[in-house]
Amino acid sequence: MMELQKAIENVTYRNSRKFPAEEFEVILGHKEEATPYLYEALDYALQKADALDTKYTLHLYALFFLAEFHDRNSFKRILKLASMPSDTLDDLFGDVITEDLADIMYSTYDGNLELLKEASKNPQNEEYVCMAMLNVMAQLYLDGTLDREEWKNYLHQFLLVKNLETELYTTAVEIICKCHFVEMLPEIYSLFQNDFINRWFLGDYDECVDLMFEYPEKEIQFCRRQVSVFSLKSWAMFEQEEKKEPKKSNAKKEGKHSQLNKPVQSHKIGRNDPCPCGSGKKYKHCCLNKPKEGLDAIESREERNQKLLNYPEVGAEVEKEEGKVYLENYFDTESIEIDQLVYLAFRCFPASVRNPKKISQDAEMKKKKAYLLEAFTKYTEKLQKEGIHTQEEYDKKFMIHYQSSQWIGNLLGILEEDGDKEKYREVLKYYNS
């Protein structure tokens, strides 16, 4: 017991830049005996608040110890601390609020969901605290602790809360997408329309749609399942060991998103090679001189696939997995075809913006125009088939990534610039109809 008391005493105040590894080991080895001291440290910080000695550190360590212990009895204390005014929180806990609070609350969660729900919607609470609470509930949902309908309904109610910070709406939308609540896409679109979303962080609405149907190889986690007090070793308040610089590798790591703007490497087919169409004939005697048709007249299948890397998986060749959501579950083939064409059009970029191959702006705009015209043809056919007379009615039933007025307006701009008056007048009939 004397050893524990000495260890607690040594870490109560910051008197050295040396990381207290030995003291931490002692405290970890005396979980039951140490816990009351840790409670006392949190209560002391709550009582002193702004008047707390700046060298007092035990309250910080207490959060991590109790989380590592998975101490459920500390949850209400931690929630009470987290509900302090923003300036006080910053003084007492600094970056712990933004970096670690969600993990700490998740590891100490005592099952009181209603308390967590109410606290997350409390406008008096600091925005990063509320964001942490949302992430805790999202992790509980992934764990199976929180029912799907209950969680979805709560998120719906959360989005209805007025005057929330933009970061809170943004966090909620990211969670909705990663939980694959496709039914909430109209609500997400409305938030984008009202400029309540941090686009710098989350991207535009079309990127949210992609995220909604994305299943990354690495398991999604909103909170770490295990907190360690030894993770504090990297904090700037402690002396850091000099690290040797690792040798730089020439190989570049590339993920799914880095492939989007990678130059397409086309495989050159020799004249005497077998024709890729599968006829069995040599390429020179088969498809070499055949005129390209359909989308191949705009750009190759390989180039299209490159632009569709982040598009939700669709098609009969996709092996459907139970429990996953797919675009075809919510939209018909025709609306998906129209949406894909518009998606391809909006990924035709001028050389000065995002085109690494430095293709001329004119060539890219020509592709964009061709894709939008093809989309427009299918769009008008769809309107006639469904007996739809307005863009609003179409969007309500069939909009996926883009609102009709958005891409049709874009097409009108291109036609006007090209001086294509006849086509301009034809398209204009359907704009803002």
Image: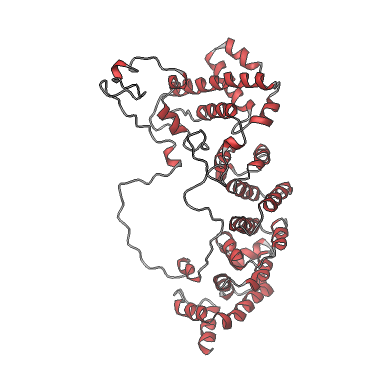
Q: Quadrant of the N terminus?
A: bottom right
Q: Which residue is most to the front? A: 280
Quarter of the figure with residue 42: bottom right
Q: Where, by quadrant of the figure, is residue 74 drawn?
A: bottom right
Q: Residue furthest left?
A: 272
Q: Is residue 383 visible?
A: yes
Where 135 sits versus 324, above or below? below
Above or below, 196 relative to 350: below
Quadrant of the rendered image containing residue 408: top right
Q: Is residue 330 above or below residue 103?
A: above
Viewer-side residue, 315 vs 58? 315
Residue at (59%, 55%) from the top-left corner?
142
Foreground residue, 363 or 32? 32
Q: Please state which of residues 229 and 73 is positioned toward the viewer in this rendering.
A: 73
**Residue 89: x and y, percent?**
63, 64
Q: Residue furthest bottom?
A: 2
Q: Give the residue at x 41% y 17%.
A: 292
Where in the figure is residue 153, as x and y percent of width and height? 71, 50
For image coordinates 63% across by 60% down, the residue present is 145
> Is 191 displayed left or right of 300 in the figure?
right
